[in-house]
Image (tube, rainbow, N blue to C red):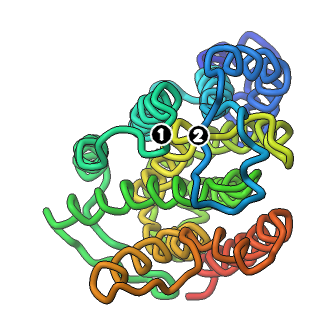
């Protein structure tokens, strides 16, 4: 909204600064963080009253998790609220990429909210039908990809080399899978206090830089990466995500006062996937979001081998529970996963220069 004031730059001194993506990104980050900090306690109190017993705890999970009974879920509402208000204030509302990514984020968040709602009222961790849920996710993602393909291109960019392969109409199922896969991978990672939100912030910060560089013709040409006109505005949206994530982390550190829930994890994962597709850095997302990939693969491997051979590879899946079963404390698992996510982000960002 504030972006519209930039039209008055000839009459109001200092307003021209609103043209700068870097300024609006910092402002968006501060705004979203303050919103979550200020309204977080009241949101938590309201959810605690409405949810009663809070998020159901898995009976087959680590014994240390039973002390978390009664903790409210749907903390993603805090993140999405802070992000939404901040983004609407500081983003260029005429930018199509902003609306595409923003829409898929809220849509995935809505699916996650309904899933969390069913879990709470039924006191069952399974939520609603996985087939219906995935069907809705694929539909939303497919529409998103269709729009991105028509305002951008259907090319797949390869890191380390200045090469783009045109996938044609196959780009739709490929990119749709990226968005849905990212959403569910983040969802699977959200199992310990603070485990998912920090890797999300690391990935969002990394893609904020990627979006800024990809949307700038001069920088894109210098780095020999694919230039996508308009994606620079996603930097501001991602800044709002990082700020909201910082505010949420304040309440999510052990012992968590609130869980992110599917409301937040599906929305944030979908956002990262959509940004990766828009900026043509889908492969780089697999590197930067390596922690999410590992978590998802651990579940796929565990379920597949058990169905085929009747054997389990891990003590419990997702893999963060495996390490808990092996004797790692929750803090050890969380912080070590944070470290891995930072290292992977640095590796992913190195692809921007190593050509």
- Residue 290, given in percent of the width and then of the height, sits at 58, 74
Q: Is residue 90 visible?
A: no
> Vertically, is 185 above or below 197?
below
Please, which residue is most extreme toward the top here? 11
Q: Are marks 2 and 1 in contact (CB under 8 Å)?
A: yes
* Residue bearing mark 1: 124
Say whether residue 243 is visible.
Answer: yes
Of the numbered discs in the image, which one, if any, rests on residue 334?
Answer: none
Q: Quadrant of the C terminus?
A: bottom right
Crowdedness near tag 1: few (<14), some (14–19) or many (≥20) residues, C-alpha within 10 Å: some
- The residue positioned 35% from the left and 84% from the top of the image is 310
Of callouts 2 and 1, the N-terminal one: 2
Query: Looking at the image, which is closer to me, 314 or 216?
Result: 314
64 displayed left or right of 190? right
Instruction: Please give the name of the residue rendered at 47% of the width and 38% of the height, measured from the top-left corner.
Output: 105
User: Does residue 89 lie above or below 291 as drawn?
Assistant: above
Camera-side residue: 64 or 162? Answer: 64
Residue at (39% x, 61% y) in the render: 181
Q: Residue at x 29, y 78 (%)?
A: 307
Q: Quadrant of residue 19?
A: top right
Relative vertical location of residue 59 with respect to residue 314 in this rendering, above or below: above
Q: Nearer the viewer, residue 352 or 317?
A: 317
Residue that label 2 marks: 56
């Amino acid at each position: 909204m504030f972006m519209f004031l930039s039209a008055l730059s000839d009459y109001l001194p200092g307003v021209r600064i609103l043209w700068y993506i870097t300024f609006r990104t910092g402002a968006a980050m501060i705004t979203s963080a303050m919103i979550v900090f200020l309204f977080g306690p009241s949101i938590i109190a309201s959810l605690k009253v409405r949810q009663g017993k809070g998020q159901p705890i898995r009976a087959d999970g680590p014994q240390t998790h039973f002390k978390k009974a009664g903790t409210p879920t749907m903390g993603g509402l805090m993140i999405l609220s802070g992000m939404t208000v901040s983004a609407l204030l500081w983003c260029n509302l005429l930018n199509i990429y902003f609306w595409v990514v923003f829409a898929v984020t809220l849509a995935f968040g809505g699916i996650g909210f309904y899933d969390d709602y069913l879990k709470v009222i039924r006191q069952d961790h399974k939520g609603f039908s996985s087939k219906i849920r995935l069907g809705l996710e694929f539909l939303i993602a497919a529409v998103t990809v269709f729009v991105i393909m028509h305002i951008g291109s259907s090319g797949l960019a390869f890191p380390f080399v200045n090469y783009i392969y045109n996938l044609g109409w196959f780009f739709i199922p490929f990119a749709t899978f990226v968005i849905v896969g990212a959403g569910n991978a983040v969802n699977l990672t959200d199992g310990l206090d603070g485990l998912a939100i920090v890797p999300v912030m690391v990935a969002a910060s990394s893609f904020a830089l990627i979006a800024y560089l990809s949307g700038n013709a001069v920088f894109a040409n210098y780095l020999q990466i694919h230039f996508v006109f308009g994606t620079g505005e996603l930097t501001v949206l991602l800044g709002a995500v990082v700020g909201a994530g910082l505010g949420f982390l304040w309440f999510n550190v052990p012992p968590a006062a609130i869980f992110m829930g599917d409301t937040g994890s599906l929305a944030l994962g979908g956002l990262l996937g959509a940004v990766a597709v828009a900026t043509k850095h889908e492969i780089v997302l697999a590197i930067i979001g390596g922690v999410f990939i590992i978590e998802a693969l651990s579940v796929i491997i565990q379920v597949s081998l058990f169905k085929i051979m009747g054997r389990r590879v891990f003590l419990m899946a997702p893999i963060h529970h495996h390490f808990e079963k092996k004797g790692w404390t929750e803090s050890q698992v969380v912080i070590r996963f944070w470290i891995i996510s930072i290292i992977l982000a640095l590796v992913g960002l190195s692809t921007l220069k190593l050509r």
